[in-house]
């Protein structure tokens, strides 16, 4: 293979694509800058992935979005920007420092009235959402701690309706996902998630490997079915 093809080229291609396809957005740029300045880890979705989430939200006509894993609110802003008037986004974050930076980024983007950021472990805030009768959500983005992906996926289904789209980030792990004997709890979490999906008749799912600014990883898409007797589609 051409030895210019690798992580450096992936990043350059991402920048090329973003340069042509993604209009500069001062609020998104400022969110990245202030997150970096605050010392948050640079693990937010790439701009091309943020725009994909935005387009998916518009394509499904999402009015209610749930995000698990806020960080500095970068993906939050991308998705919230896709909402129609009256739409809402609930985002869950365990780290108070991340939540504080996210709140200021969301505010700068003019989205404070649209975004409901809940501080706490998602496995505690998710049941609270259910108790409050929140949802069903039209789009769910699962992007928090990876060992708990299977639990978050169960909650996503629980808070869904037929037609809900569930997006799960980081499900390829540089290919480590196929290592059945892996002791990495992140890999184990992702593998348990795929096994759950494989046995779950209420969703139709796929996963896509990606390269880019964020190296080699990927995302899964699961569509909640209306008719549980349907097994393929
Ligand atoms: N979606 C963000 C990136 C999220 S990074 C973006 O693309 O912009 C993952 C986030 O999940 C981190 O901020 C981390 O603090 C948070 N997190 C980790 N464990 C969590 C838990 N148990 N509950 C809620 N959030 C959690
Ligand atoms: C990590 C988390 C993410 O959601 C991501 O997209 C990349 C890396 C991490 O915890 O390292
Ligand atoms: Mg992620």
Image (tube, rainbow, N blue to C red):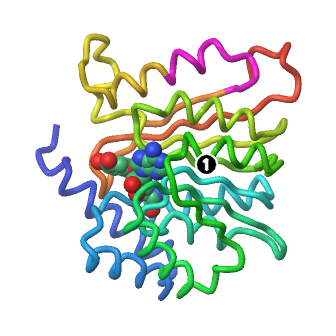
Using the image, determine if residue 230 lies above or below residue 123: above
Q: Residue 137: horizontal and vertical position, in percent?
A: 76, 49
Q: Nearer the viewer, residue 75 or 103?
A: 103
136 on left or right of 37? right
Using the image, determine if residue 97 lies above or below residue 133: below
Residue at figure coordinates x 67%, y 38% from the top left: 156
Q: Nearer the viewer, residue 133 or 50?
A: 133
Residue at figure coordinates x 52%, y 15% from the top left: 195
Residue at figure coordinates x 24%, y 71% from the top left: 39
Image quarter for residue 188?
A: top left
Using the image, determine if residue 24 lies above or below residue 125: below
What range of the chain is rendered magenta? Answer: 193-204
128 on left or right of 105? right
- Cβ of disc 1 within 8 Å of ligand 1? yes
Could you tell me which secondary element the residue under label 1 belongs to? helix
Quick check: can you spot residue 223? yes
Question: Can you identify the residue that label 1 sits on?
Answer: 125
9 on left or right of 56? left
Quick check: can you spot residue 144? no
């Amino acid at each position: 293979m051409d030895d210019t093809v690798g992580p450096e080229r992936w990043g350059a291609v991402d920048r090329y694509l973003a340069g042509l396809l993604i209009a500069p957005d001062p609020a998104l740029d400022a969110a990245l800058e202030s997150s970096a300045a605050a010392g948050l880890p640079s693990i937010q979705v790439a701009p091309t992935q943020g725009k994909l989430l935005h387009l998916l939200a518009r394509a499904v006509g999402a009015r209610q979005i749930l995000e698990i894993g806020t960080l500095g609110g970068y993906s939050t802003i991308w998705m919230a920007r896709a909402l129609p008037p009256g739409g809402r986004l609930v985002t869950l974050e365990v780290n108070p420092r991340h939540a504080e930076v996210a709140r200021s980024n969301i505010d700068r983007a003019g989205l404070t009235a649209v975004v409901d950021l809940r501080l706490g472990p998602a496995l505690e805030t998710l049941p609270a959402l259910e108790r409050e009768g929140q949802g069903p959500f039209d789009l769910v983005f699962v992007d928090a701690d990876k060992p708990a992906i299977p639990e978050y996926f169960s909650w996503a289904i629980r808070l869904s309706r037929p037609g809900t789209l569930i997006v799960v980030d980081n499900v390829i792990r540089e290919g480590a996902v196929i290592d059945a004997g892996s002791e990495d709890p992140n890999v184990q979490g992702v593998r348990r998630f795929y096994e759950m999906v494989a046995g779950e008749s209420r969703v139709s799912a796929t996963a896509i490997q990606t390269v880019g600014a964020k190296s080699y990883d990927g995302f899964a898409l699961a569509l909640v079915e209306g008719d549980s007797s349907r097994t393929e589609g």
